[in-house]
Image: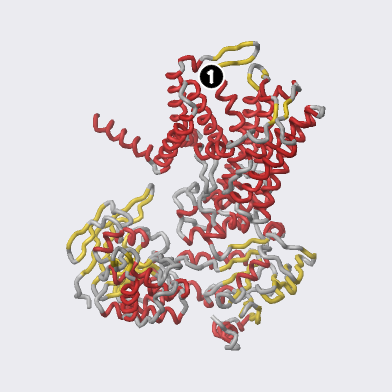
Amino acid sequence: MTDKPGLLTVEGICKSFIGFKALDGVDFTVRSGEIHALLGENGAGKSTLIKVLTGVHQPDSGVIKIDGQAVNVRDTQHAQNLGIGTVYQEVNLLPNMSVADNLFIGRQPMRFGFVNRKLMEERARELLAQYDLHLDVASDLSRYSVAVQQLVAIARAVDMSGRVLVLDEPTASLDRHETEILFAILRQLRARGLGIVFITHFLDQVYEICDRVTILRNGKLAGCALTAELPKIELVSLMLGRTLAIATHNTRRDRPVPAIRQFSFKGLGRSRSIAPFDLDIGEGEVIGMAGLLGSGRTETAKILFGIETADTGHVHIDGNPALIRTPQAAVACGFGLCPEDRKSDGIIGDLSVRENISLALQAQRGWFNRLSGREQTVLADKFVKALDIRTTDIEKPVKFLSGGNQQKVILARWLATNPRFLILDEPTRGIDVGAHAEIIALINRLCDDGMALLVISSEIEEIVAYSTRVVVLRDRAHRGELSGDEITASNILGMIAAEPEGASA
Amino acid sequence: MSRLNTAALTKAMPQLLSLMLILFLNYLAFPGFFEIRLQDGRLFGSLIDVLNRGAPVIILAIGMTAVIASRGVDLSVGAVMAISGALAATMTVSGYPVPIVILAALGAGLLCGLWNGILVAYFDLQPIVATLILMVAGRGIAQLITEGSIVTFNEPGLIFFGTGSFAGIPMPILIAALLLTLAIAVVRRTALGLLIESIGINRSASSYAGLNSKLLLLVIYAFCGVCAALAGIIIAADIRGADANNAGLWLELDAILAVVVGGTSLFGGRFSILMSALGAVIIQAMNTGILLSGFPPEYNLILKALVIIVILLAQSFSSLGGWAFLKGEFRSKGANRQ
């Protein structure tokens, strides 16, 4: 297999943006008939490399070769003509148009100047049949799950380009079963001789499906190896540039059970959102919250933080009744919330890192008690340093930071208010291994400093690693609680999967 | 600090250049354009005239900037001007003292702004629709106040706000300058500037961060209403009467234009009240110039559109880093010569 010719080769690619070298002399080869993982922390240069390959960016220097011929990829259209097809993380299809339209948009078969629907739909069926997908091609794409939409996007990209397929985190929003289907199709395409570039954050998937890995770090090539010859621990250390015992396995501490639980929520609930639940949290505790997507985890967080108002129940803080019907009220009680959807509910994209970090504290201080520019700078500098936020400048708009760094900015925003109770909704979703480990370490540190934390996560290993207690949710209700030695991945999974008729995904 | 000022100046370059060009063209069309003289203790001259005539739109643009920065728009300001003017004129004719009249007219503007704010912030209506309601209904309300006629008055205390002067400076200019200074000071000395930009860019995330975005929106629209009322009083005082049908007609569009020319995006976010005022001055300088040049006023609208296209294109060029690019080009050429 190692003797297969290089289908797509890049040599010595450099690309700089203002004040920042995104790619620095990177070499990368995709061979025909292989699945090649492209790995690296956020900001390592993966996206930039892909954008250079697909003609979105022009490299400052370096060569791109296809079948040994040097080419100059002018734009995305040109990249497609050269045989390089891309499917992005957020599927770029038109959900309100039919499956067939999506497959053939811009190249519909025409007759008398009109789209020949019949022919187009027939071709669409044939095309999808190759993937064992039998869909109603005339119905709207939005009728199908994200997984199927992803497959349609892949079918389209392969049909149009057919030599190299670039997949940018294709499994990020797929469940286990859907991932299996995707992998089956990738294996089929590999057998057909395509070169597949696979970008992911899930290391297990790299070992499951990829033949080779290329690892980038800080815009430079950190390593390239056959997957089978590269132990996981070595892979992680190449990505991070330091040896790191897998972070999620040894952070668990035996924390004393707090004598008093300062934050007490009794019978809180909201119809059609979450069934009434009781929750007590003490300072110095991390409560893990596990459950499938849609089990009521985020709804719980929203009610606790006053984004949605509870129709039942009451809240006591330090034994005194409290009314939390708005986020302002929650903040006044010393609460903070890092929301699940970072882009729409977290960052203020056009504002600088400095302003984003200052925002919650400023809101708490009131309109007329302004943090001066200097105070904001001091605050931002402090947290950029403390949380190792990677940015060239605190005046940079936060939208230009990578996902992990944006998450740290939002964490910094709340830590600046010195909260007593912090709710983190999926704090590690979509961020790289390094930032992941740092955020878990931060959760432990904050807990040791006496903060009360509620952490919602889909990653059960992670919950096991840091939780003092675990609440399990299912079907919009709190179903049970685990503490001490009961906290194991299999116990949590067992509770999530209990009563199979109710365990809908 | 000086680096910041240079950056601000670079950003303001398209507007400043446009203004200079327009003033220069005005000078060509009317050589006496830059003459200013003191007569009867008041400054006169075309430049003063530009500022004096432009004052109502400057005042509107100040309120409109806050609204647009919050990712909204207020179409009702022209109608609110008519309401406040009608109220001021009618109450003056009925013999109320000037301070009461002014407070009542401003109060009417405040109520109108609160109405808009409640619809936008608490009922989540789209700003363009919410304020369209008052844009249409407002002129009806103004007509009800004046009972369908044009109400004229001769109260010197009120007329003073339109045609009077203080220390040689016409009152409208003085009021606009005062409001401008006050608004900039309030917005930048308090956290309001940051918070308005924040809700304009991402209201949901701002609410999650603990910002009371509803209350802030209400205040923004209320402020815009008060600005409109103030502009309405000045216009009524200037013409010594209130015309419910025509007072402030289409001025909402001039105000929005002033804000956009000043560089604030209709998508909300970063804003500059000073630049919006500059935008209003540019618009008025054009209007005055066309009048002075003796062109038929029909050309006014077309020329205005042309100039605005040029300014917006220059802005777009500028935001794409065009100036820096040209500068770099210039420098590298200079280096080659050495």
Question: Is residue B254 left or right of B229 when viewed as pictured?
Answer: left
The residue positioned farthest toward the front in the image shown: B148
- Comparing B278 with A282, the one in front is B278
User: Residue at horizontal 60%, vertical 12%?
Assistant: B38
B179 is higher (above) or lower (below) than A95: above
Answer few, some or many: residues within 10 Å of disc 1's Cα (few below 14, many 20 plus, some between 14 and 19): many
The amino acid type of the residue labelled 1 equals: Ser
Q: Quadrant of the C terminus of chain A?
A: bottom right
Question: Is residue A56 left or right of A474 when viewed as pictured?
Answer: left
Q: Quadrant of the N terminus of chain A?
A: bottom left
Q: Is residue A260 visible?
A: no
Q: Looking at the rendering, which quadrant does residue A237 occupy? A: bottom left
Q: Position of residue A390 (x, y in %)?
A: 46, 55
User: Residue at horizontal 74%, vertical 31%?
Assistant: B88
Count of residue discs: 1
Dot 1: chain letter: B
A501 is higher (above) or lower (below) than B320: below
- Comparing A387 with A424, the one in front is A424
The residue positioned farthest toward the left in the image shown: A69
User: Residue at horizontal 66%, vertical 78%?
Assistant: A478
Q: Position of residue B239 (x, y in %)?
A: 66, 25
Q: Is residue B168 visible?
A: yes
Query: Which residue carries the number 1 mark?
Result: B46
Q: How is the image coloured?
A: secondary structure
User: Residue at horizontal 58%, vertical 57%?
Assistant: B205
- Comparing A178 with A400, the one in front is A178
Question: Is residue B98 left or right of A438 when viewed as pictured?
Answer: right
Q: Position of residue B73 (x, y in %)?
A: 58, 46
Indicate the secondary structure of the residue bearing disc 1.
helix
Q: Position of residue A116 (x, y in %)?
A: 32, 70
